[in-house]
Image: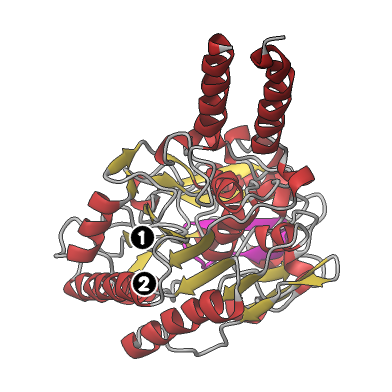
């Protein structure tokens, strides 16, 4: 008897086993190790801030990684709502963080942004942020000053969180580098998988002096130096082959239009707050809300609808669907939006900021940046614009996390990943299976 005939069933069995092992589902083979992920947010970094500044390190990222032309934040272009959209992948009407300030329109409670950062009742509305979803799937996560990272979600806290306190300085370059050192230490010494890191600039400079200033250019140069320090530190910590980095922001910034150049929006010129309103959250950039007294909704609406040429007013039921805010109970009966650069002043004009945000997310001045680099990202890749809500499924893909329900789309970002990659250093897994199949067919032809 020909020995090759006896060998044929054994060979078939052997290669079948090899193919099955190579293609075994991750859930069956145990969790595969993915690369680590660092998400960095620079508050108020407008999409084109580095176009008029010498930024050699940001320029290097363009050649060595991915740049999106710009990304579009959610409609309420404020810090807390936008950051929470990024970390949950949900529209504002779904996650419920509708303002920087925590408020209650019944009790008239208002808390400043930083005093809101430890209030779970403001953030925990059913939409799970990625920290918690990742932890529930075996990953170790941390938040360094990222909005929403310092509270509990259905009783669960982020593995490690540091929360920014009121009055914390935002522009100290030495502290900025110390943050990088701390975070990279979490990756190398404590084996964290996913960390979010927040910086309060260039938002503060943009507010204080305006975006079209030398001071803003200097803070962008400082950010660029930090990016250089980050890249060097990644190399020193031997993380270059196992750490992906995403750099983004929450909203842009624009110059505020002031009297006497324009007629500013002062709502008390058109209506009586004492007679008509129960609650308002105004004097906070280009977005505001009013809860009229019982039976006064139509009257407030009529008085404000055509009051100022640079003011748009909606009843809650009239809010356009593509704003993705109307369905949330925290959105008040009347929503007001100023044209770009026109702040909403309620009773008197006390506003001193030279720059602000909160305006329509369709305005180019509200668009933000997106940069990414690391082992799972292509090099020298320019991505088309996309909504920030789609950063979430990208992060889940990179971490190997099954995403929670979300409004983003991986199709917006898939092209920026290394082709045929299965993030985590397992690029070519599909190619390996195909190669084994080809080898098996070749051997069988020889038998």
Identify the main secondary structure in magenta. strand
Q: How many marks?
A: 2
Q: Residue at x 35, y 83 (%)?
A: 171
Residue 444 seen from this side: yes
Q: Residue at x 41, y 83 (%)?
A: 170
Q: Residue at x 26, y 76 (%)?
A: 222
In the image as oriented, which residue stretches furthest toward the front? 1
Foreground residue among 166 and 436:
436
Secondary-structure class at tag 1: loop
Which span of residues is magenta-colored? 276-291
Name the N-terminal-most of marks 1 and 2.
Answer: 2
Foreground residue among 157 and 169:
157
Q: Residue at x 36, y 62 (%)?
A: 45
Task: Find residue 301 and report its horizontal and vertical position in percent.
Answer: 64, 45
Foreground residue among 385 and 331:
385
Residue 332 seen from this side: no
Q: Quadrant of residue 255?
A: bottom left
Task: Find residue 422 and report its horizontal and vertical position in percent.
Answer: 54, 42
Task: Find residue 336 and report its horizontal and vertical position in percent.
Answer: 56, 50
Query: Height in image: 437 above or below 117?
Result: above
Secondary-structure class at tag 2: helix
The residue labelled by disc 2 is 207
Classify mark 1: residues with Cα within 10 Å, few (<14), some (14-19) or many (20+). Answer: many
Q: Quadrant of residue 235?
A: bottom left
- As drawn, is 330 to the left or to the right of 149? right
Query: Height in image: 38 above or below 10?
Result: below
Q: For the residues labelled 1 and 2, say whether their Cβ atoms are less than 8 Å apart.
A: yes
Foreground residue among 107 and 434:
434
| Alpha carbon distance from label 1 to label 2 | 8 Å
Q: Which mark is residue 253?
A: 1
């Amino acid at each position: 008897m020909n020995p090759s005939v006896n060998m044929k069933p054994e060979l078939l069995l052997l290669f079948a086993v090899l193919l099955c092992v190579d293609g075994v589902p991750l859930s069956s083979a145990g969790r595969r190790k993915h690369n680590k992920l660092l998400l960095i947010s620079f508050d108020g970094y407008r999409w084109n801030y580095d176009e008029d500044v010498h930024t050699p390190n940001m320029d290097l990222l363009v050649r060595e990684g991915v740049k999106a032309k710009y990304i579009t934040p959610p409609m309420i272009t404020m810090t807390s709502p936008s950051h929470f959209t990024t970390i949950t992948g949900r529209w504002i009407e779904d996650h419920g963080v509708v303002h920087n300030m925590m408020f209650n329109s019944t009790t008239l409670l208002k808390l400043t942004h930083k005093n809101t950062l430890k209030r779970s009742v403001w953030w925990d509305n059913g939409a799970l942020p990625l920290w918690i979803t990742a932890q529930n799937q075996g990953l170790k996560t941390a938040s360094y000053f990222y909005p929403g990272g310092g509270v509990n979600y259905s009783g669960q806290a982020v593995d490690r969180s540091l929360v920014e306190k009121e009055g914390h300085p935002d522009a100290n370059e030495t502290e900025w580098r110390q943050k990088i050192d701390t975070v990279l230490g979490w990756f190398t010494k404590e084996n964290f998988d996913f960390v979010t890191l927040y910086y309060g600039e260039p938002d503060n400079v943009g507010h204080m002096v305006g975006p079209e200033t030398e001071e803003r250019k200097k803070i962008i140069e400082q950010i660029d130096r930090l990016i250089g320090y980050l890249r060097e530190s990644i190399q020193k910590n031997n993380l270059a082959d196992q750490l992906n980095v995403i750099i983004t922001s929450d909203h842009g910034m624009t110059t505020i239009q002031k009297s006497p150049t324009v007629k500013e929006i002062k709502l008390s010129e058109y209506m009586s707050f004492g007679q008509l309103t129960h609650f308002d959250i105004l004097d906070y950039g280009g977005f505001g809300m009013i809860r009229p007294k019982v039976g006064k909704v139509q009257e407030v609406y009529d008085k404000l609808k055509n009051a100022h040429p640079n003011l748009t007013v909606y009843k809650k039921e009239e809010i356009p669907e593509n704003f993705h805010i109307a369905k949330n109970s925290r959105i008040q009966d009347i929503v007001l939006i100023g044209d770009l650069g026109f702040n909403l002043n309620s009773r008197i004009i006390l506003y001193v900021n030279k720059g602000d945000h909160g305006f329509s997310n369709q305005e180019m001045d509200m668009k933000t940046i997106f940069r990414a680099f690391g082992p799972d990202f292509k090099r020298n890749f320019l991505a088309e614009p996309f909504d920030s809500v789609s950063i979430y499924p990208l992060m889940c893909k990179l971490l190997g996390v099954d995403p929670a329900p979300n409004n983003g789309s991986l199709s917006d970002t898939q092209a920026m990943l290394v082709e045929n990659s299965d993030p985590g250093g397992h690029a070519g897994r599909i190619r390996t299976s195909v190669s084994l199949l080809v080898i098996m067919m070749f051997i069988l032809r020889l038998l």
